[in-house]
């Protein structure tokens, strides 16, 4: 039995292929920048693991709290964009069939526009905008929070900012949760302030053989942030 697709559905499939190509190109460019871009200072190297591949944080006194790496976020960006396109295509196709009509050009244009806009935003956010990022600036700790669409992809225009003055931050701590079953260990960075304890970054998937290396990286990162804040 041959599956018949209307223009909206065919367009969604075409853009799925196009999105996959875009991900490969953008991911390749990000890898080249990371591998052959400006050399990181020792401070930049100490924080890079806790930046989760965000291009805009590279070389900055900043960390992010994310559950995925750059590649995973970019794949999610394509899935999200195509999902939006499929939902719109289904809605317009259902309306057209209920009226015994073909899908109109307006529906096709809206579907494709939504896919392109969602894809562009999601790829940009995957590379540049953590749900939570923490920076050391002018003797204070700047915390930026964004609202989640799905996983580590934020909604546009939802950034909120908090400033923690150095006097209110008592210390930056590294907390380890040792592996129990396979590679389920974590190392996180917390700030302890007058407002309580707050996580600012975490690395997941730590195996027993990598436990000491991850803990050492966390200790270096926490010491650096604490030093720069003072």
Image (cartoon, helix red, strand yellow):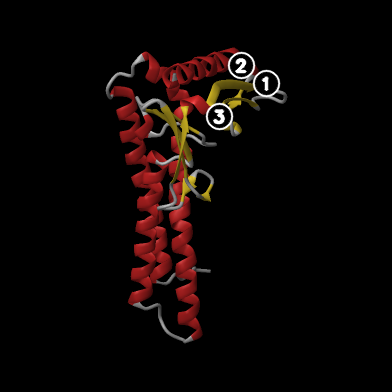
User: In the rendering, at what x and y percent does residue 132 appear?
Assistant: 49, 39
Q: Mark 1 or mark 2, which is nearer the start of the sequence?
A: 1
Cα distance, mark 2 to mark 1?
7 Å
For this orientation, the residue located farthest to the bottom is 99
Query: Is the C-beta separation of discs 2 and 1 under 8 Å?
Result: yes
119 vs 56, nearest the viewer: 56
Label 3 crowd (10 A; few <14 / some 14-19 / many >=20): many
| Disc assigned to residue 138 | none
Q: Quadrant of residue 30?
A: top left
Residue bearing mark 1: 178
Cα distance, mark 3 to mark 2?
14 Å
Give the answer, above or below, for where 215 lies relative to 185: above
Residue bearing mark 2: 211
Give the answer, above or below, for where 206 lies relative to 26: above
Query: Is the C-beta separation of discs 3 and 2 under 8 Å?
Result: no
Q: Mark 3 or mark 1, which is nearer the start of the sequence?
A: 1
User: In the rendering, at what x and y percent does residue 73 appear?
Assistant: 46, 41
Say which element carries label 1: loop
Query: Is the C-beta separation of discs 1 and 3 under 8 Å?
Result: no
Label 2 crowd (10 A; few <14 / some 14-19 / many >=20): some
Residue bearing mark 3: 202
Say which element carries label 2: helix
Q: Identify the residue at horizontal 30%, vertical 35% (top origin).
A: 29
């Amino acid at each position: 039995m041959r599956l018949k697709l209307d223009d909206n559905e065919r367009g969604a499939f075409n853009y799925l292929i196009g999105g996959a190509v875009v991900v490969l190109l953008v991911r390749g460019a990000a890898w080249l920048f990371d591998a052959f871009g400006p050399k990181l200072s020792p401070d930049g190297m100490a924080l890079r693991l806790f930046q989760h591949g965000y291009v805009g944080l590279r070389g900055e006194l900043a960390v992010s709290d994310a559950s995925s790496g750059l590649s995973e976020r970019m794949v999610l960006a394509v899935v999200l964009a195509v999902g939006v396109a499929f939902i719109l295509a289904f809605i317009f196709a259902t309306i057209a069939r209920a009226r015994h009509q073909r899908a109109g050009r307006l529906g096709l244009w809206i579907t494709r526009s939504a896919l392109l806009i969602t894809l562009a935003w999601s790829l940009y956010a995957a590379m540049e905008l953590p749900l939570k990022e923490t920076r050391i600036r002018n003797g204070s700790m700047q915390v930026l929070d964004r609202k989640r669409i799905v996983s580590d992809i934020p909604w546009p225009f939802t950034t909120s900012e908090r400033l923690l003055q150095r006097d209110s931050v008592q210390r930056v701590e590294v907390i380890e949760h040792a592996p129990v079953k396979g590679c389920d260990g974590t190392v996180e960075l917390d700030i302890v302030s007058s407002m309580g304890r707050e996580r600012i970054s975490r690395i997941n998937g730590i195996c027993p053989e990598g436990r000491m290396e991850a803990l050492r990286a966390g200790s270096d990162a926490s010491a650096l942030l604490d030093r720069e804040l003072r």
